[in-house]
Image (cartoon, rainbow, N blue to C red):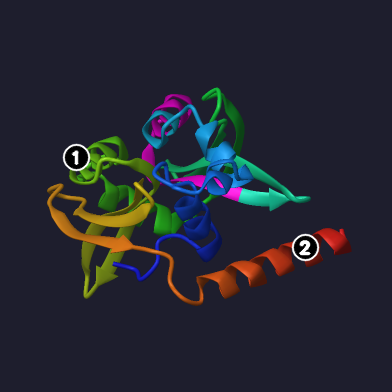
Amino acid sequence: MRPALLPAFLLAFALVCCPAAADDHEKESPACRSLANVRISLMEAVLRASRVVPGHVMEAELEIEKEKGRLEIDYEVEIYRAGFLFMIEVNPLTGRVEEIEAARVKVKKGRRLGLLLAPHLSMPEAILRAARVVEGRVLEAELEIDEEEGKAEFTYELAILKEGILYEVELDARTGAVLEVEARTKKKGDDEEEEEEEEEEEGKEDRD
């Protein structure tokens, strides 16, 4: 499993939005209010995106960005279909599909993906299985394909927030077996990374 499924900013955001936070200031923080306003689950976002663009769901995440000092939240779902990768944006409040972008995949890579993806657990099934292991809010799910020596290994990696702890769950995408569960809390150094990301974002806004 990767050492960190989520970037430092999203990790910090998730931990601040702990439903069991004891501090009133944390409960009333903008980040906490933003997450509390999310009405659509990751599973629902995946299902709604799949109705619009049927195909193999490769990745889905609750994306959080700072725009001019404000937190912008939406779901992004990536679907592979017939040689194209579709990026579908789903509104986390209404479930409405708001934007669809498509990019053609190179022919050779597209054929390989088409062959590889056929026999595997679907993204909704993976989310359900992981949610049985860790009952919390699923923030991100990704299908990883690792090709070595002519063989391909498929795993699902999911990030789930439960009571202020971020869990990373890894599943075998062929069988659904749980391969690893790891709890991640905010580590020393995450604050510095978060500050650097915020400074970079502010610099971009100033240049714009």
Crowd rating for badge 1 (residues with CA inside 10 Å; few <14, some 14–19, many 20+)? few
Q: Is residue 114 left or right of residue 60?
A: left
Q: Tell me if residue 143 comes above or below residue 86 in the rendering.
A: below
Q: Which mark is residue 202?
A: 2
User: Which mark is first along the chain, 2 or 1?
Assistant: 1
Residue 54 part of the magenta-drawn span: yes
Q: What separation in Å lies between label 1 and label 2 (alpha carbons)?
A: 40 Å
**At x 12% / y 51%, what residue is drawn?**
177
**At x 44% / y 47%, what residue is drawn?**
21
**At x 21% / y 75%, what residue is drawn?**
149
| Residue 8 % position (x, y) | 51, 65
Quarter of the image where one finds residue 102: top right
**At x 12% / y 48%, what residue is drawn?**
175
Crowd rating for badge 2 (residues with CA inside 10 Å; few <14, some 14–19, many 20+)? some
* Amino acid type for the residue under numbered disc 1: Arg
Residue 171 part of the magenta-drawn span: no
Q: Secondary structure at mark 1?
A: helix
| Residue 130 % position (x, y) | 23, 45
Query: Which quadrant holds the C terminus?
Result: bottom right
